[in-house]
Amino acid sequence: MSEPGLRREENSVFIGEKPFMNYVTSVVMQFTAKGSKEVVIKARGKFITRAVDVAEVARKRFLENTVAVKNIVIDSKEFENKEGRQVRVSDIEITLAKKEA
C-alpha cells in the first residue's frame, strides 16, 4: 500500500506500527550491511515522534560517532481519507548521513 505524498526509495525507512526496534535495526542495517551513505527516515502524523526517536537511538546508541543528522524536512499534505473528507497530515523526513572520515 503506497502512502500518498511520500516517495518510497531504497534507502528509506517508513515508520509505522511495527515494533520500535525493527525500525532502528533497519536504519542500522542500511548503513552497515548495505553500505548506504545516507538513510532517510520518513513518518506521517502520529508516527513523527517515533521517527525522531528511531533516528536518535540509531545515531546515539548503535552508530555512535559514525552518522549525523544531515537534513530534516517537514511538510503537511492534504488528501482524502476513507470517509471521503479532506484531511491535512504533517510529515517529516530525517536524513542521516555517514560522517566524513
Image (spheres, rainbow, N blue to C red):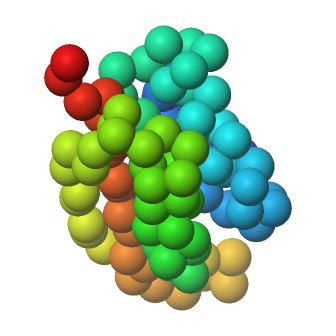
> Does residue 64 appear left or right of residue 2 in this picture?
left
The x and y percentages for residue 80 are 52, 74
The answer to whether 24 appears left or right of 73 in the picture is: right
Regarding residue 77, the answer to whether it shows in the image is no
Q: Position of residue 26 (x, y in %)?
A: 65, 38
Q: Residue at x 25, y 66 (%)?
A: 74
Q: Which picture quadrant has residue 33?
A: top right
Q: How many marks?
A: 0
Residue 52 lies, in percent from the top left, at 45, 67
If the image is split into quadrants, where does the C terminus sit?
top left
Residue 37 vertical position relative to residue 19 in the rendered view, above or below:
above
Q: Is residue 75 left or right of residue 60?
A: left
User: Closer to the camera, 62 or 54?
Assistant: 62
The residue positioned 81% from the left and 61% from the top of the image is 19
In this view of the protein, which residue sits in the foreground, 16 or 22? Answer: 22
22 to 99, vertically: above or below? below
Q: Residue furthest right?
A: 19
Q: Is residue 10 left or right of residue 75?
A: right
Which one is nearer the viewer's eye here, 46 or 21? 21
| Residue 96 shows up from this direction | yes
Q: Residue at x 30, y 34 (%)?
A: 97
Could you tell me residue 76's position as x and y percent?
Answer: 31, 73
Residue at 45% x, 61% y is 56
The answer to which image quadrant residue 38 occupies is top left
